[in-house]
Amino acid sequence: MGEVCLAMRGQMGDNEYYVTTTKAYKLIQSVGYASEMENWPDMTVDERMQRELKGERIAQEIVPYLATDPDWFFGALIVDIYSGWEYAKFQPLTEVADVKYDVYSDAMRQAGFLTLPDDKRLIALDGQHRLAALAMAIRGKNGIPGSVDLSDALKNTLVNAHPDIGNADITVMFIKHGDDNTKIRKIFNKVNRYAKQTSKGDNIITSEDDMVAIIARRMFSGEDAPLHPIGDQEVVNWKSNTIPLRSKNLTTLSAIYTMTEILLAKEGITPKTRRNEEMLEKGRIIMRDFWKESMSKIDIFKTYSEYVEKNISLGDIRKDHLLLKPVTHTALAQAVAIAKDYGHEYTELIDKINKINWSQDNPIWGNILVTNSMNKRMITGSQALKDAGKIIAYMLIGNEFSDKEVEEVREILKKAKADIKNEDGSLAEEAEVVLPPIIE
């Protein structure tokens, strides 16, 4: 008779599909992977890349989520009835039950029993990483497909078997394969092409696992938030990663997240650290104190607050002052982290921070924080952040730097000045690199 399951029938375009649930332990036994399809070698390179299992993501992200979070949840897997599809049968409830009320008739025609033949072959079109993670979580590391190299990925992940996960009900959408591979290939490509990953900002706002994200949110939302709104004006732009010139926001959620990640790394709090309420509170207090000190003692931040309170435009001062730019906030956090390695508390550094020339016209920031072009665009990127942080740290505590670190600063400046051009577009002659003054 084959396998029978209760299902709902649906239609999208010309495709009839069936939605049902199955136990996770049955799913990992019966559903295979795209690489097991006979036409795998004939697929195009981009199709094969889309279908390749990424072992590191499975082992370091999905399996720990399954094994450690009691609230784990998955979306539906799309499964192709690759062979035996001709014998798959759907029988609506109207054929097996006596309908007494017309109001139920439409629903009963769509609900029914799906019978799959014993010799069926099922292939995951969408969700194969979730499928592989279920296999690994239920069986342990040997449950993952052998074609995936997990040697590095498994070093820092939980690999013990968790058979209780096998009783979870997983939602599956079945689609019949048909005589032509074109339909299935089209479905796979469209599902992957139009699937939109949530943005970094969305993840920061919604995550309850990432302690860095939780702490970053608490800087402007909730009780004792140091970046609470000034009147009805939000201090933090949590909807976008940019701050327009005349905006009354001070910084962005993305910048706060990066700063939190930098400043709490030495406390053992990272985006991948398993949530711990004690560590969460410790990190929140550290960042709360950081921002309270910043808002009350950094001159330009105090000016910002006064302007917002009096409804004065920030355009003129924001145009020139780099400490009103989110990129500079993250670079400053990098510098503070470096200074902390030397035993300096943030409160010791604030007077020096106020003495730094933060004007975008200060030559020291050319090709470090801003481009040397006429429009003075801000420079972003992880390496630019590190370079700018090193320069700022030198200005704060450079007299404590080793010879090697001073040389690193010199090389950063040398590389930045190497791109300066003359008015005719030719490269300027190499100028002597002058280290910035160390603030006393």
Image: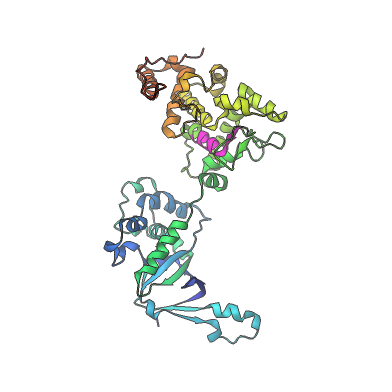
Q: Which residue ends up furthest to the top in the rendered image?
A: 440
Q: Magenta residues, as a range?
A: 250-261
Q: Can residue 438 be seen in this view?
A: yes
Please tell me how many numbered marks the rendered image carries.
Answer: 0
| Residue 60 in magenta stretch | no
**Residue at 47% over, 56% down:** 195
From this view, report whether residue 105 is shown above or below residue 209. below
Image quadrant holding the N terminus, namely bottom left
From this view, report whether residue 212 is shown above or below residue 423. below
Q: Can residue 342 be seen in this view?
A: no
Q: Residue 199 at x, y = what percent?
A: 51, 47
Q: In this view, does 230 lie to the left or right of 397?
A: right
**Residue at 43% over, 61% down:** 190
Q: In which quarter of the image is residue 391?
A: top left
Q: Residue 423 at x, y = what percent?
A: 42, 22
**Residue at 43% over, 26% down:** 367
Front residue of 357 and 289: 357
Front residue of 102 and 25: 102
Q: Quadrant of residue 323?
A: top right
From this view, report whether residue 39 is shown above or below residue 278. below
Q: How is the image coloured?
A: rainbow
The majority secondary structure of the magenta stretch comes to: helix
Q: Residue 345 at x, y = what percent?
A: 53, 22
Q: In this view, does 234 lie to the left or right of 408?
A: right
From this view, report whether residue 282 is shown above or below residue 401. below
Q: Residue 194 at x, y = what percent?
A: 47, 57
**Residue at 44% over, 14% down:** 399
Q: Quadrant of residue 53?
A: bottom left
| Residue 260 in magenta stretch | yes
Front residue of 79 and 260: 79
Q: Which residue ends up furthest to the front in the rendered image?
A: 424
